[in-house]
Amino acid sequence: MQKIHIDIVSDIACPWCAIGYARLEQAIKQLAPEYEFGVQWHAFELNPDHSGEGEPILPALARKYGRSEEEMRATQNQMMSIAKDLGVNFEKLQERLTTNTFDAHRLVKWAGEQGLQTEMKLALFEAYFGRAEDVSDPSVLLSCVENLGLDRSRAEQILKSDEYADVVRADEATYQQAGVSAVPAFIVNGKYLISGAQEPDTLVQAFEEIGGKPE
């Protein structure tokens, strides 16, 4: 069976990253008989300088993109509709606050060592987009850890220290230097970049083309 490895560069605060992964899952299911897929998540921060209290998401996005709140609400409504069709919980997408995701990325790295990297990432998406929880809050992060059956006290230890900080920063620097400036970005077999939350059929076609190329 042919192997395809996918490095996913994404942020926990990026709705298109959650949609992009759900679409990727559909593409993987379609190709499962022919290909064996491996997935590795890599950190990216949309809001790296964020500190203090979060701000309601709609005015924050309107200011960031120079659009009206009504336009941002329409865009978010569209995302909610897409997510619902994919079975992804975006119920509180418009009620969330801006947040810093650095500590969440640290825990994703740690969860990866326990073989639960994707599960941790999805739990964080669910917390932020589905329940509008603050994913910079240690209690929210520890709740995600517990729900996955991971060691809460070890996670607490990590959050109180700077463990995995260097790993996350190195990850971010690597992909920024490689030219990734928007997420999600999928790097296939270390060579081919697929940008954005592409439709499953587009991904299937891309993987079949890549799979047919000699190494």
Image (tube, rainbow, N blue to C red):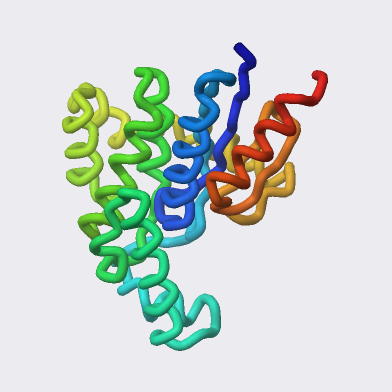
Q: Is residue 86 left or right of residue 46?
A: left
- Dividing the picture into quadrants, the one containing residue 53 is bottom left
Residue 51 percent location from the top left of the image: 38, 61
Residue sitting at the far right: 214
The residue at the point 51 percent across, 58 percent down is 46
Residue sitting nearer the eye, 105 or 123 = 123
Question: The C terminus appears in which quarter of the rendering?
Answer: top right
- Residue 125 is left or right of residue 167, and the answer is left
Picture coordinates of residue 40, whole percent (x, y): 52, 29
Q: Position of residue 143 (x, y in %)?
A: 17, 39
Above or below residue 64? Residue 197 is above
Quarter occupied by residue 162 = top left
141 relative position to 19: left or right: left
Relative to residue 215, is residue 207 depicted above or below?
below
Nearest the eye: 66 or 169: 66
Q: Nearer the viewer, residue 92 or 110?
A: 92
Q: Position of residue 208 (x, y in %)?
A: 68, 31
